[in-house]
Image: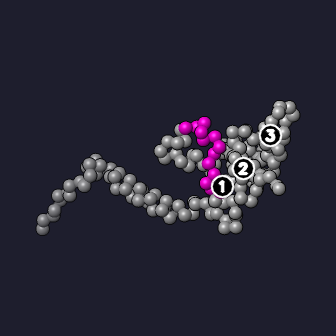
Amino acid sequence: MTTNTARRPPLHADEAHGRTPIRPLISCGVAAVSALLAFAAPALAHEHPKDNLDAHFLDTLERPDNAANPARNMAGTFNSRLCCTDQDAVKVDYEMVVPDGGKYPEPEWYVWIDLDGTGVKRVRVPPEKIVEDYAPTGQAYAFVLGHTIQCFVRPQPRT
């Protein structure tokens, strides 16, 4: 009776040293992550309520300070030009204050909002963050990122 004691040649250099080959593990990991993202992407997408008349306006609203930030025009940075989406807009109470003096004083805008998690406060809106357009419903909105107001949609004047 003869016994074949010959070992098969290693399939990978790692096997020759008694280690598990890493390349197949990486391939499986990449495939698993790809599959997870493919199925999770719809779950991560914003759901827009069909009855919100302002949704499209808010989704496509560009930041009013884009001209002062030319880096936002670079390839692949279009989304940084946007205020965000309608899901990130917060309806806010507001106050417009016209300062005394000057022939044509610019109004100052204030909103009541919680920027830092410590409660709602009256916050002055920086003039460069005020959007020229109005939401279709006339509602005032603020977009907040990193504890700062990125965009403020003024309320539409009532006629």
Whether residue 101 sits left or right of residue 33 in the image: it is right
Q: Amino acid at mark 1?
A: Leu
Residue at the outermost right position: 100
Q: Nearer the viewer, mark 1 or mark 3?
A: 3
Q: Which residue is mark 1?
A: 58
Query: What quarter of the picture does the C terminus occupy?
Result: bottom right
Residue 64 in the magenta stretch? The answer is yes
- In the rendered structure, the answer to whether residue 58 lies left or right of residue 3 reads right
Tags 1 and 3 touching, CB below 8 Å: no
Q: What's drawn in magenta, residue-wise?
A: 57-70
Residue bearing the label numbered 2 = 153
Q: Which residue is mark 3?
A: 107
143 magenta-colored: no
Query: Is any part of residue 115 visible from this angle?
Result: yes
Q: Earlier in the sequence, mark 1 or mark 3?
A: 1
Q: Residues within 10 Å of mark 3 (few under 14, many from 20)?
A: few
130 or 124, which lies in front?
A: 130
